[in-house]
Image (cartoon, rainbow, N blue to C red):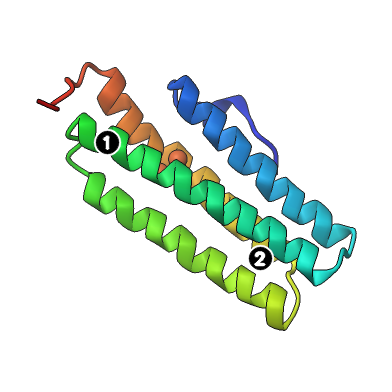
């Protein structure tokens, strides 16, 4: 469940944001492992959701500025993340958050970075032009 060099997509600001997402994930798993109060775990889930929202909006703007042809499909992937996080957040309130639920979503994020995020990064780094007028 740790950051590895292979997750780097080659755009420094995005890599930093991805590392922050991983750090927020680890904060949740640590609080679950420590059996902290539900409200503390819930707070950390909200913190992850809040930063993920910022990150996804940032990526969306980047893709639009470079007219990335798959930006709409990519936005759909981000919606999947929120749907999955919502289930975890609900669990924190009505039941309990299990380690494997959090790990599954982090694995989803790693997979997303490796395939979808790398795809837009390669498009941009491959010489795509800014299309804003
Ligand atoms: Fe991303
Ligand atoms: Fe993304």
Residue 123, x across and y down, in percent? 26, 27
Check mark 1 vs ligand 2: CB closer than 8 Å? yes or no. no
Q: Secondary structure at mark 1?
A: helix
Residue 60 horizontal side relative to residue 29, left or right: left
Residue 51 horizontal side relative to residue 30, left or right: left
Q: Nearer the viewer, residue 63 or 126?
A: 63
Relative to 12, residue 50 above or below:
below
**Residue bearing mark 2:** 101
Relative to 53, residue 63 above or below:
above
- Quadrant of residue 124 within the rendered picture: top left
Q: Secondary structure at mark 2?
A: helix
Residue 113, x across and y down, in percent? 46, 40
Q: Residue furthest bottom?
A: 94
Q: Gap between marks 2 and 1, in whole Å?
A: 30 Å
Please tell me in which quarter of the rendered image ligand 1 is found.
top left
Q: Nearer the viewer, residue 26 or 122?
A: 26
Residue shown at the point (26%, 52%) measured from the top left: 73
Q: Residue furthest right?
A: 34
Mark earlier in primary sequence (2, 1): 1
- Quadrant of residue 85 within the rendered picture: bottom right
**Residue bearing mark 1:** 63
Residue 97 horizontal side relative to residue 16, left or right: right
* Picture disc at residue 31: none
Q: Could you tell me if residue 112 is visible in this image?
A: no
- Quadrant of residue 31 within the rendered picture: bottom right
């Amino acid at each position: 469940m740790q950051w590895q060099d292979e997750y780097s997509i080659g755009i420094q600001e995005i890599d930093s944001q991805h590392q922050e997402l991983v750090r927020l994930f680890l904060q949740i798993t640590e609080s679950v492992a420590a059996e902290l109060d539900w409200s503390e775990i819930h707070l950390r889930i909200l913190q992850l959701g809040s930063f993920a929202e910022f990150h996804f909006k940032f990526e969306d703007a980047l893709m639009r500025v470079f007219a990335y042809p798959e930006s709409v499909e990519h936005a759909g992937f981000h919606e999947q993340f929120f749907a999955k996080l919502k289930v975890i957040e609900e669990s924190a309130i009505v039941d309990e958050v299990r380690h494997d639920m959090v790990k599954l979503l982090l694995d989803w994020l790693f997979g997303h970075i490796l395939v979808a995020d790398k795809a837009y990064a390669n498009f941009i780094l491959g010489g795509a032009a800014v299309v804003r007028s």
